[in-house]
């Protein structure tokens, strides 16, 4: 999905634009910013705007930052609309629990983002927030790779269980041998741990979908 989705942003607020631009890079999305909706390319059919500004739009789909608890949630909704996926049947977070943990986040079979983390706590908090944002999905899974260091896996699993106990997600421990087959080309700039997590997520979708 990365590099193929364009989301529009119409605002005079440069701080808001900078924050959304930073988040969009994490999601691999091209954010097209303009102060005038009429100046946006025709292929940008989903636009993020602010209710605090007078923005005049035509037939394009518009979402407003103020309607969401965070800009991450706002951008994720814009992505869903852009991809034509109004429902969220399944949410998957696949984790490679290596020295530098990597994770891939999916809605149905769409990869929203991949990320490498500096610490397990940072990863657990991100997973918790992601699952909470998508708590209305029909099914929620966390797929945890079974690395050689099983003590680290067990520790991470315990932290995840405590963090997402109220979300209703199922934690699945999965064999990581699938991740080394390289059935997909590695995306430029993606770390080894992120790529492993992406492959785990694909395996989980194939097995759980």
Image (cartoon, rainbow, N blue to C red):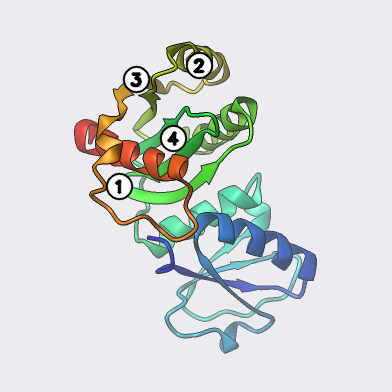
Judging by the rendered image, the residue that carries numbered circle 3 is 173
Rendered position, 104 above or below 29: above
Where residue 136 sits: x, y (%)?
44, 35
Alpha-carbon neighbours of circle 3 within 10 Å: few (<14), some, or many (≥20)?
some
Image quadrant of residue 197?
top left
Judging by the rendered image, the residue that carries numbered circle 2 is 152
Check disc 2 and report its element: helix, strand or loop.
helix
- Mark 3 or 4: in front is 3
Position of 67 compared to 6: left or right?
Answer: right
Rendered position, 13 above or below 1: below
Q: Residue at x 63, y 80 (%)?
A: 56
Of the two numbered discs 1 and 2 on the same chain, state the one appearing first in sequence: 1
- Mark 1 or 4: in front is 1
In this view, which residue lies farthest toward the bottom? 39
Alpha-carbon neighbours of circle 4 within 10 Å: few (<14), some, or many (≥20)?
some
Could you say which disc has been placed on residue 136 in the image?
Answer: 4
- Mark 1 or 2: in front is 2
Where residue 60 sits: x, y (%)?
48, 75
Judging by the rendered image, the residue that carries numbered circle 1 is 109
Q: Residue at x 44, y 17 (%)?
A: 149
* Residue in the foreground of this view, choosing between 12 and 170: 170
Image quadrant of residue 145?
top left
Q: Marks 1 and 4, Cα distance to the nearest angstrom?
A: 17 Å
């Amino acid at each position: 999905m990365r590099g193929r989705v364009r989301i529009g942003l119409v605002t005079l607020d440069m701080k808001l634009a900078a924050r959304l631009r930073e988040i969009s890079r994490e999601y691999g999305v091209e954010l097209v910013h303009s102060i005038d909706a009429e100046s946006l390319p025709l292929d940008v059919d989903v636009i993020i705007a602010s209710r605090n500004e007078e923005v005049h739009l035509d037939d394009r789909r518009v979402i407003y930052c103020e309607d969401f608890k965070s800009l991450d949630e706002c951008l994720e909704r814009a992505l869903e609309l852009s991809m034509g996926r109004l429902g969220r049947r399944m949410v998957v977070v696949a984790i490679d629990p290596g020295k530098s943990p990597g994770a891939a986040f999916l809605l149905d079979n769409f990869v929203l983002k991949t990320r490498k983390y500096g610490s397990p706590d940072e990863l657990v908090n991100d997973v918790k927030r992601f699952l909470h944002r998508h708590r209305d999905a029909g099914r929620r899974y966390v797929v945890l790779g079974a690395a050689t260091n099983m003590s680290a896996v067990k520790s991470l699993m315990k932290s995840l269980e405590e963090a997402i106990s109220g979300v209703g997600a199922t934690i699945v421990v999965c064999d990581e041998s699938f991740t080394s087959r390289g059935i997909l080309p590695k995306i430029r700039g993606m770390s080894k741990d992120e790529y492993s997590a992406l492959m785990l997520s694909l395996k989980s979708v194939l097995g759980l979908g």
